[in-house]
Amino acid sequence: MPKVFIAKPVGFCFGVERAIRLAKEGLAKWRRVYTYGELVHNPLVVKELRNLGIKELRNLRDLAAVDDGALVIRAHGCPPNVLLECERLNIRVIDATCPYVQRVQNVAQKLTEEGYQVVVVGERNHPEVKAILAASGKNAEVYPPKRKNRNKKIGIVAQTTIDRNCFRESVANLISLGYNEIRVFDTVCAEAVARQKATMALVKRVDGVIVVGGRNSANTKRLAEIVFRSGKPVVHIVAGEELDVEEWRQFNKVGIVGGASTPAQAVAEIARLLKNFQLPPAEGRKSGEEPLAWRASGGFLQTLSLRPGTIEF
């Protein structure tokens, strides 16, 4: 059996936990709840919400389906026109936008009002980036900007889950272009950075890494990229059923990392498969509560603090 190392933080980040809690509270209060797009980028979580009766809407035309219930804005935020349409249709809104994502939108809006062209360093087609662009006016662009008018003044913000080194390299490149004025706001989420750092430290201690999380999860993909660049074997899976257990048991030391929307239980399940032990409930855990981290001790798992590091067993 390999020695297993789990990188911390693990389990839901603050923004994901908050979004799920708000959606469930809304369901208990109004019975009929919808989300605008996937609430978070993890199919296990989305499936659980669907099983509870929370349905997803895909576009503005679908908003008419929201009658006497409520619409939950996803953790990634939404373009302003969605909120305006909800107001027009008198739709009850539960805003589950992550506060850190909302901060980026607020910064981008303020930059636009002050006459700066906003440049977003991030994934062009990610819902968070689309929402930031929509909040920033028609002149906002995703890095690298197509229009390099050096007489302009630009304001740079980051998608919250982008690799911080990538953000810094992008900023350095924009500075080298000689714009008239540049303002930079490092809006990368501190928790995303903590997971990236934990992954960097983990790869130095293990023979290979299993990354657990949604394939459309930007922050999870960043973790897989970090391992890939290190040259160590890596696999990105959603759940334990996708893992070739026997192949990974051939390693002496295996690392496991989870994305910010990956349930801690999904990470613990990978450890269980590798170590072949039973996974009873954590002592002292409230019903329905998502543990922030897990530790194996005498075959039992218990919750830990969110302090960065690794869990070894």
Image (spheres, helix red, strand yellow):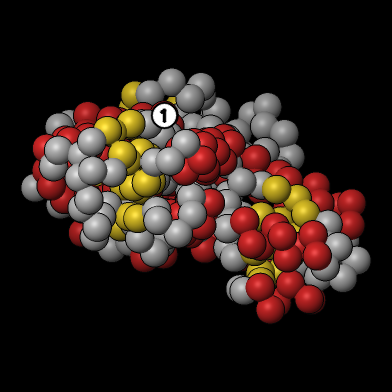
Compared with 15, 128 (above or below) is below
Q: Is residue 206 left or right of residue 102?
A: left
x then y, percent, for residue 278: 50, 45
Q: Which quarter of the rendered picture does the N terminus lie within?
A: top left
- Element type at marker 1? helix
Neighbourhood count class around disc 1 (C-alpha, 10 Å): few under 14, some 14–19, many 20 upward: few
x then y, percent, for residue 94: 75, 50
Q: Between residues 260 and 99, which one lies in front from this camera angle?
A: 99
The residue under the point 48% across, 50% down is: 136
Q: Amino acid at mark 1?
A: Ala
The residue under the point 89% across, 51% down is: 29
Q: Is residue 48 left or right of residue 114?
A: right
Q: Which quarter of the rendered picture does the C terminus lie within?
A: top left
- Determine the residue located farthest toward the left in the rendered image: 231
Residue 299 at least partly seen:
no
x then y, percent, for residue 180: 23, 36
Q: Is residue 92 left or right of residue 84?
A: right
Q: Between residues 72 and 247, which one lies in front from this camera angle?
A: 72
The residue under the point 45% across, 59% down is: 138
Question: Residue 191 appears in which quarter of the rendering?
Answer: top left
Q: Which residue is label 1 attached to?
A: 190
Compared with 271, 45 (above or below) is below
x then y, percent, for residue 222: 29, 48
Compared with 44, 165 (above or below) is above
Q: Between residues 80 and 117, which one lies in front from this camera angle?
A: 117
Residue 28 at least partly seen:
yes
Q: How many marks?
A: 1
The residue under the point 33% across, 31% down is: 183
Q: Between residues 80 and 23, which one lies in front from this camera angle?
A: 80
